[in-house]
Amino acid sequence: MSVARQFLRTCRAGRNTVPIVTRIPTNHFSTTRANCLQTTDQKNRIPEKEVPVTDYDAGHSSAHKRTLPVNPTPLRDTSSSSWPDPETVDPLTRDVYERMPKTMRNMSMFGKTVIITGGARGLGNHMARACAEAGAKNIVIFDANQELGDEAAAELHDKTGLPISFYRVDVRDAAAITASVQACVEKYGVPDVLINSAGIADSNIKAETYDVAMFRRLIDINLTGSFLMSQAVGRTMIAAGKPGSIILVASMSGTIVNYPQEQSCYNASKAGVIQLAKSLAAEWAKNEIRVNCISPGYMDTALNRVPALEAQKKIWKSLTPQNRLGNVDELNGLCVFLGSDASKFMTGANCIIDGGYTCY
Ligand SMILES: NC(=O)c1ccc[n+]([C@@H]2O[C@H](COP(=O)([O-])OP(=O)(O)OC[C@H]3O[C@@H](n4cnc5c(N)ncnc54)[C@H](O)[C@@H]3O)[C@@H](O)[C@H]2O)c1
């Protein structure tokens, strides 16, 4: 009986195929192996108790053979209580930071002081949590909502033990912003990072009937608010000669026109934020202050959880290659990257994060 036939028989009998493979001459192997493995995989799958392993590495002068016991327990049991609770926030400790490789340390926000507007809920709140997990030393939330802001700050402090402050500030109020940023500087030092996430949306309003007062209000919050916050924080960085990173949350609506809802004012406000970021980036590059935008697509936050938008959400999904809205924490990685030294050569950029919406 040929070696190849012997091999096939063994496979059909369902025995361990691994040692046999080593005895098969290569010319037989190429023609018979595919069929044999297919038979084994589809009909006679037998769980191995151990896996033979051969290592070729610096620790051994020649090939080092060993067996790897197969643990029948799944590596990740999502039903088990040991799986991290998505609500936990684990701050990056000095000990862990110091053991991280250079690239990962560079991608952290270790030791940084962060001011975040709109941090009381939604995307801003989750970015604040991410900053804590990425090593921020202090986090200051600016938000117009007293109750939510207090709750968010207390919760983040309880979960992390980090110093967290909440200032009830409306981003339209230049004097309150200046006083509050100054108070933060006195308490925590000049901030390293500003994240501007405060914003509102109006949609399904036709341009020909758009109320002027509403138009002005939205521009005041989304665009002028981004400017006032950047100006106040930028001033302190410039005065201290301290490099920093400013992250403005714009929107994909700053570069595309959403469909089917009519929302000329929101779209214009976010286009303004993107151009503001580029202008500040160019002006303040000499001060080592970087200014970049995160432009989300449709995200599953309270801003969009309104009954009037339910039917339109189906259309939004169908126009998004990933066929879903973004999760509330899906800006976190980009936010940490832009706040970290890993993005030191990046300024004036508009990063769209939209499940592919703008591909079409
Ligand atoms: N959710 C989305 O689909 C989406 C998409 C693109 C861009 N964005 C932008 O992301 C940012 C955050 O959106 P979100 O979905 O988390 O919204 P959200 O409504 O859940 O949170 C916004 C936060 O900003 C605060 N805020 C509103 N007006 C303020 C003001 N005048 N001064 C200070 N704080 C104020 C609110 O109190 C709230 O805590 C906004 O700028 C929004 O335009 C959201």
Image (cartoon, grey):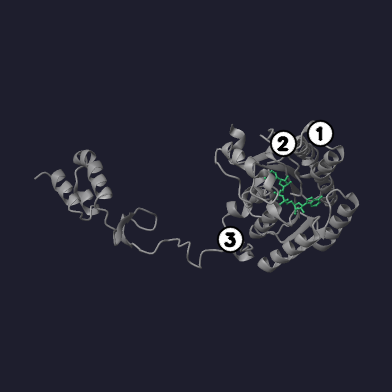
Question: Dot 2: within a 10 Å radius of its alpha carbon, few (fewer than 14), some, or many (20 or more) residues?
Answer: many
Q: Earlier in the sequence, mark 2 or mark 3?
A: 3
Image quadrant in which the C terminus is located: top right
Q: Nearer the viewer, residue 16 or 359?
A: 359
Numbered tag placed on residue 254 in the rendering: 2
Q: Position of residue 79 (x, y in %)?
A: 47, 64
Nearer the observer: mark 2 or 1; the answer is 1
Q: Gap in Å between the C-alphas at discs 2 and 3?
A: 31 Å
Name the amino acid, label 1. Thr
Q: Residue at x 34, y 56 (%)?
A: 61
Q: Which residue is mark 3?
A: 86
Q: Which residue is mark 1?
A: 209
Q: State yes or no: Cβ of the residue under disc 1 lies below 8 Å from any atom of ligand 1.
A: no
Image quadrant in which the N terminus is located: top left
Nearer the observer: mark 3 or 1; the answer is 1
Q: Quadrant of residue 130?
A: bottom right
For residue 20, side relative to residue 284 (left or right): left
For residue 52, side relative to residue 3 (left or right): right
